[in-house]
Amino acid sequence: MRQSIKVLLSCALAVQLFVPAVVADPVAATPASVQQQLAPELEFFRPLLGIVWQADMGEQNGKKQTDRAFWQRALNGQAIKTIHSINDGAYGGETMIFWDKKKKSLAYYYFTTAGFYTHGVMSFDVKTKVLTAEEQVENNANGITAVRSKSVLAAESLAVSSEYLQHGKWVPGHTAVYHPTKDGQVRFQ
């Protein structure tokens, strides 16, 4: 569970974008050849969109943990939606990332199959291509109340690392490097 909290970016960060058995955009009205608009503040996410990203999360209780995430444009380009699933739905979540005009910041909500959710803000450094996120965790059974993460966006990878505020102490979270995969699908049980 500890490894699973923030595959964002997971999405995020990270983050993610989400649906039952196989992920596909059920509202695809525009041909892929047409460049779809995104809010300017979300434009840096464009290289991640429409791709299934996969990471080996190591082992937990002797079982290999594979995370798959799918990022997509949502709400006419006013948001980014991510969905991710570890081991075909043993754990997973959905994230909505958007520009919060009042806060003048990227904001997001992350909902999980474990029954907890998070909400937070993130910032992107254009020079270093690092996405930094801070979130509050609600209803976590393991005493985690906050998460901090960094995601490094590269042409063919998304490297994520995090730490958790658990029982009042910051502890190491998970690390993962996601790569595009052609044979993976995001599945839920």
Image (cartoon, rainbow, N blue to C red):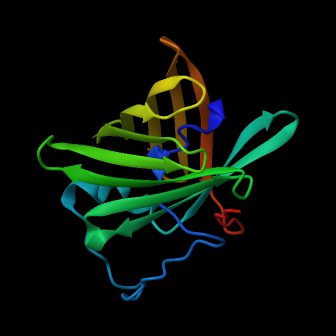
Asked whether 43 or 24 is in front, the reply is 24
96 over 102 or under it: above or below:
below
| Quarter residue 78 falls in | bottom left
Q: Residue at x 48, y 77 (%)?
A: 25
Image quarter in which the C terminus is found: bottom right
| Quarter residue 171 falls in | top right
Asked whether 2 or 42 is in front, the reply is 2
Q: Residue at x 37, y 34 (%)?
A: 132
Residue 83 visible to an observer of this rendering:
yes
Residue farthest to the right, as pictured? 62
Residue farthest to the left, as pictured? 102
State how many labels appear. 0
Would residue 49 appear left or right of 39 to someone viewing this image? Answer: right
Measuring from the top left, give residue 5's x and y in whole percent.
56, 37
Image quarter in which the N terminus is found: top right
Residue 154 visible to an observer of this rendering:
no
Would residue 97 appear left or right of 94 to someone viewing this image? Answer: left
Measuring from the top left, give residue 10's x and y in whole percent.
50, 45
Q: Residue at x 46, y 25 (%)?
A: 145
141 over 179 or under it: above or below:
above
133 over 29 or under it: above or below:
above
Would residue 76 appear left or right of 114 to someone viewing this image? Answer: left
Would residue 123 appear left or right of 170 to someone viewing this image? Answer: left
Measuring from the top left, give residue 76's x and y in whole percent.
27, 73
Q: Which residue is drawn at 58% across and 26% down?
A: 173
